[in-house]
Image (cartoon, helix red, strand yellow):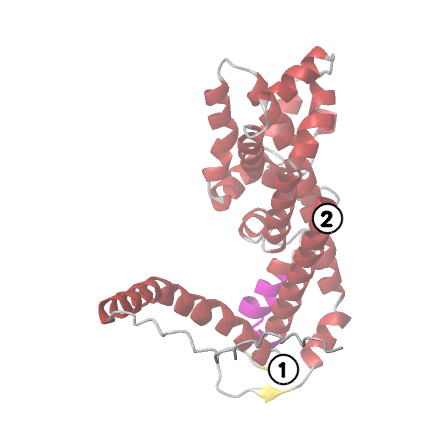
Amino acid sequence: MQTEQQELPIKPKAEPLKPAPRLNVPKKKRKGKMKQNMVGWAFVGPIVLFVVAFIYYGIFYNAYNSFFSWDGISFDKVFVGFENYAEMFRDPDFYLSLKNTFIFTILTVTIQAFIGLVLAYFLHTQGPLRTAMKSVFFFPVVLSPVVLGAAFSQIYDFQFGYINEFLRAIGLGSLEQNWLGDPDIALYSVIAINIFQWTGSSMVMYYMAMLTIEKEIFEAAKIDGAGFFRTLWSIVFPNLKGTTFTLSILGVIGGLKTFDLVWITTAGGPGSSTEFISTYLFRKSMLQQEVGFSSAVAIILLTIALLITYIQLRVQKKMDN
């Protein structure tokens, strides 16, 4: 019995893939794109040159000078390796300046943020005179630290200062203090000036952030019977964590480089009770002409600032996740 053989269909051979045709970009478009890029670099270029010339070059030049003994004037530099760093870590005034700087930074950042948050929420809920009150609280921010330092030097004066005069006038002369001359309270007197100046900045940042919170949340809290501080702590503060971290980073950087306010009021005294890392650096570089040594201090200060900022950003990232 013969079976019919079925012929399988033969698949046609696949044609080889052809490369995609190249798009011919018109010369006018290519020239327009190049021109656009050149315009962009024309705007960015000066900024890049400025940053490289005045920031990165300064950092590397400081790092280079930190390995030399140099007075900043003569052409002779004596290579000493890490001796400047070793001498710095042996100096007790260096540790005292770090301690004062950290106390100043922690207290100012914390108190400014708290008072600024309370003021911002108060102005957010109160209608009358809100604009005028914001201006009053923000006004110290626009003043120069030199002006404020000179003004508070008169206010803090032991004999004729307004604070002691007021205490004497109301019969509390026993509470008068030598606010800038007593080593035990001079640092906290300077801290009070800084808080007075920058609390308005924290208030404005918190106030602008509160405007992004939906009004229905505040209305629901009011219906539930939440009071002023309960609403502030349970609703406002959790929704403003980003603003709080921004203020903390700015406050830490500002605290580490605070100089003019301290120098005008106390110049690091009495003794070294208000010596900051910035005044310590200035004293070593400009007054004692130890430029190599002060360059080592500047590098350590930069390292501390970068390390603290990195830790803050890491903490913020974990809290956001």
Does the image show residue 182? no
- Residue 256 vertical placement versus 54 (above, below): above
Q: 317 and 70: which one is in front? A: 317
The single residue placed furthest to the left in the displayed view is 28
For marks 1 and 2, the one nearer the N-term is 1
Alpha-carbon neighbours of circle 2 within 10 Å: few (<14), some, or many (≥20)? some
What residue is shown with label 2? 103
**Kind of residue sitting beneath label 1:** Phe
Q: 7 and 189: which one is in front? A: 7
Residue 121 horizontal/vertical position (percent): 61, 24
Residue 89 horizontal/vertical position (percent): 75, 71
Callout 2: SS: helix
What residue is shown with label 1? 67
Q: Which quadrant of the figure has residue 281?
A: bottom right
Instruction: Point out the stretch of residues depicted in magenta.
Output: 280-292
Does the image show residue 46? yes
Q: Which quadrant of the figure has residue 109?
A: top right
Q: 268 and 67: which one is in front? A: 67
The residue drawn where x is 67% and y is 85% is 81
Q: 83 and 250: which one is in front? A: 250
- Residue 169 vertical placement versus 56 (above, below): above
**Kind of residue sitting beneath label 2:** Ile
The residue drawn where x is 71% and y is 71% is 88
- Based on the picture, tell me whether residue 289 belongs to the magenta stretch: yes
Q: CA distance from mark 1 to mark 2?
A: 30 Å
Which secondary structure class fits the magenta region best? helix
The residue drawn where x is 67% and y is 53% is 313
